[in-house]
Amino acid sequence: MPASLQASRVSPAIIRTLRKIRLVVFDFDGVFTDNSVYTDEKGHESVRCSRFDGIGLARLRALGIDAFVLSTETNPVVSARCRKLKLPCLQGCSDKLPALLREAARRKLKPSQVAYVGNDINDSDCLRAAGLPIVVADAHPEVLPLARWKTRTPGGMGAVREICDCFHRVLTAS
């Protein structure tokens, strides 16, 4: 079984927190992608994402947990991938925390009911505010202390799927 599909080992405290989460907000670059960008001679960008993520997100939605992408970048690649995954997204957001709090409030949720998945220093405020701060395995060292859960899988290699599968496993356990 690929590492991206191996069961995450999470503490009982995180399992209790997972049961309270109603919204998972994901950064895009470095979480859905491996943080690489391919640029052609005309300046068009492409990124690498894992196809495993789509089924994971569908399973997450089936549990009644919403997902949302919040990105600093404004890039058609983000829009295209989010459309394909049926994920709402907000791009070009230089200050992510107010956007995160607005999205939670719009859904009548407290920050404690929100998980945030990030990988870099521009995610710091959201990681501090979220009820469940999550970073991917290859996150920048400065955000590691802010996380309660670090995935075993790097960004772009199935980290999103790992998170969704953990929610599924915890919330469907008898």
Image: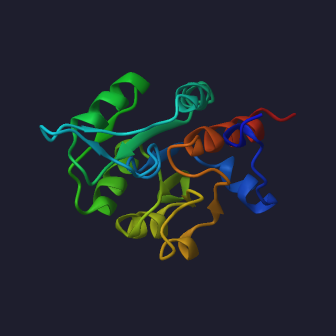
Which residue extends farthest left? 42
Q: Residue at x 40, y 49 (%)?
A: 104
Q: Quadrant of the N terminus?
A: top right
Residue sitting nearer the eye, 140 or 83: 140
Q: Is residue 39 left or right of residue 101?
A: left
Colour basis: rainbow
Measuring 67% from the left and 41% from the top, which residue is drawn there?
A: 4
- In the shown orientation, is residue 133 left or right of residue 81? right
Residue at the far right in the pictured view? 174
| Residue lying at 25% horizontally and 63% vertically, measured from the top left | 95
Residue 78 lies left or right of residue 65; in this view the side is left
Q: Position of residue 127 (x, y in %)?
A: 47, 65
Report x, y in % for residue 159.
Answer: 58, 46
Which quadrant of the view contains residue 131?
bottom right
**Residue 46 location, quadrant:** top left
Q: Is residue 99 above or below residue 42?
A: below
Total marks in image: 0
Provide residue 89's location: percent of width, then percent of height.
Answer: 32, 38
Residue 20 is situated, as x and y percent measured from the top left of the image, at 64, 49
Position of 43 compared to 62: left or right? left
Decide: is 49 above or below 149. above
**Quadrant location of the C terminus?**
top right
Taking the view exactly as shown, the residue that stands out farthest to the front is: 41
Toward which corner of the image does residue 82 lie, by quadrant?
top left
